[in-house]
C-alpha cells in the first residue's frame, strides 16, 4: 500500500512547490498521528484488556486497522491524478535498472535512503535498551516520547520555508541531516537524565525537530527524480523508483538493526540483567555518537544533489515540448 501511496505526490502535480506542500502536509499529519497514538495506545490497551492484556492488544490493533483502512480508502477515492503518464507497457527490470543508474539525483537520494534506514532504525532499536540499562529506568522513554511530539510536528512543517530559501530539496535535506547529527553528538555529553534532565530532553526535542525536517525533505525528493529520469532516458517509471527507494531504506534498516543486535550479543548482553561496561558503551554510542556521525555523512552525500528548482522547471518545460536530455 505504501508504494502506490508514495507515488501519488508525483502523479498529482508537476509543480515543485505544490509537491513540497503536499509532502509537508503528509509529514505533519503523520507526526500528529504518531503523537496521538503514543499518548492513547497504552490507556486503550488497559481499558480493553482489563481482564487480559492479550485481549487489549488485539482489540486496539483491530480498531486501528479499521481506522487506517477507512482513511486510505477515502484518500485513494478522493485523490485526483493530474500528470499524464505513458501508456501501460511491460518494461523489464533490467531496462528500468539501467535507467535509474543514469539518474544521478535519484542515486544520491537512494544512498541517502540507505543511510537513513541504517541510522534511524538502528537507533530506534537501541532506544529502549538505552533507557532501560544505561539510564536505569525504562519509564524515561515515555517522557522522552512526550518531549519529541511537538518538535516533530514543527520540524516537519519547517521543510517548506527552508526549501523556499534554498530552492533545492537535496540541499534542504542536507542541512537538516547535518543539524540532526550535530544535535545527536551533543547529546553524548548530557546522557545522564538524572543529572541534567532539562538539557537532555531539550536536546532530544531539538534533535527530533531537525530529524522531522529531514524526513519530510528526503521523501519530497523522489517525485522530482522521476521527471529527471524521464528527461534523461525517455522512461517514466514512478512506481519502480519509489519501490527501489523503499528497498534501499529497508536494506539500511536490516543492516542497522542486525549490526546492533550482533554487537550486543558479541559483548555479552543478557536480558533483564545488569550489563557489563562494553554493552553499556555500545548502547550509549548507538544512541548518540554513531548515528550523529552517520547523519553528518548523509548530509555530505545529499549536499551534492544538484537538481534545484530552476533546473527542475527547465526539465519539465522541455518534457512538455517533447525534448530529452
Image (spheres, rainbow, N blue to C red):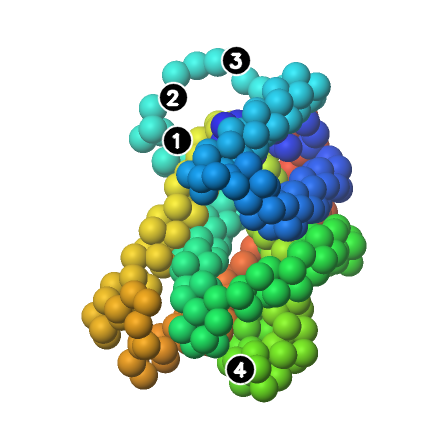
- Give SS at disc 1: helix
Q: What residue is drawn where x is 34% and y is 24%?
A: 92
- The residue that label 1 is drawn on is 96
| Among numbered discs 1 and 2, the one appearing first in the sequence | 2
> Gap in Å between the C-alphas at discs 1 and 4?
50 Å
Asked if disc 1 and disc 2 are in contact, CB closer than 8 Å, the reply is yes
> Gap in Å between the C-alphas at discs 3 and 4?
59 Å
The answer to whether residue 293 of the structure is visible from this angle is no
Residue 295's place in the image compared with 52, above or below, is below
Q: What residue is drawn where x is 48% and y is 13%?
A: 88
- Nearest the viewer among 196 and 14 is 196
- The residue that label 2 is drawn on is 91
| Among numbered discs 4 and 2, the one appearing first in the sequence | 2
| Among numbered discs 1 and 4, the one appearing first in the sequence | 1
- The residue that label 4 is drawn on is 192
- The residue that label 3 is drawn on is 87
Amino acid at each position: 500500500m505504501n508504494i502506490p501511496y508514495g507515488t501519488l505526490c508525483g502523479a498529482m502535480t508537476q509543480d515543485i512547490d505544490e509537491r513540497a506542500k503536499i509532502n509537508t502536509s503528509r509529514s505533519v499529519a503523520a507526526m500528529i498521528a504518531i503523537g496521538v497514538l503514543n499518548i492513547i495506545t497504552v490507556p486503550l490497551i488497559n481499558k480493553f484488556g482489563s481482564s487480559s492484556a492479550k485481549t487489549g492488544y488485539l482489540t486496539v490493533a483491530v480498531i486501528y486497522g479499521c481506522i487506517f483502512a477507512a482513511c486510505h480508502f477515502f484518500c485513494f477515492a478522493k485523490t485526483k491524478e493530474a500528470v499524464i503518464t505513458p501508456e501501460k507497457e511491460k518494461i523489464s527490470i533490467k531496462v528500468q535498472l539501467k535507467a535509474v543508474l543514469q539518474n544521478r539525483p535519484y542515486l544520491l537520494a537512494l544512498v541517502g535512503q540507505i543511510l537513513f534506514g541504517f541510522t534511524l532504525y538502528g537507533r530506534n532499536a537501541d532506544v529502549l535498551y538505552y533507557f532501560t540499562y544505561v539510564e536505569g529506568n525504562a519509564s524515561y522513554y515515555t517522557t522522552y516520547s512526550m518531549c519529541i511530539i511537538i518538535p516533530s510536528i514543527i520540524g516537519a512543517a519547517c521543510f517548506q520555508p527552508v526549501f523556499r530559501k534554498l530552492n533545492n530539496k537535496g540541499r534542504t535535506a542536507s542541512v537538516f541531516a547535518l543539524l540532526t547529527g550535530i544535535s545527536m553528538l551533543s547529546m553524548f555529553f548530557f546522557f545522564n537524565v538524572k543529572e541534567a534532565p532539562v538539557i537532555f530532553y531539550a536536546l532530544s526535542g531539538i534533535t527530533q525537530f531537525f530529524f522531522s525536517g529531514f524526513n519530510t525533505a528526503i521523501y519530497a525528493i523522489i517525485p522530482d527524480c522521476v521527471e529527471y529520469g524521464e528527461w534523461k532516458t525517455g522512461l517514466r517509471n514512478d512506481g519502480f523508483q519509489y519501490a527501489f527507494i523503499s528497498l534501499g531504506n529497508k536494506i539500511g534498516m536490516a543492516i542497522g538493526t542486525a549490526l546492533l543486535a550482533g554487537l550486543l550479543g558479541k559483548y555479552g548482553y543478557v536480558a533483564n540483567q545488569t550489563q557489563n561496561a562494553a554493552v553499556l558503551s555500545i548502547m550509549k554510542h548507538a544512541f548518540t555518537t554513531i548515528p550523529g556521525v552517520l547523519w553528518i555523512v548523509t548530509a555530505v552525500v545529499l549536499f551534492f544533489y544538484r537538481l534545484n528548482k530552476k533546473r527542475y522547471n527547465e526539465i519539465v518545460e522541455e518534457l512538455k515540448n517533447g525534448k530529452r536530455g
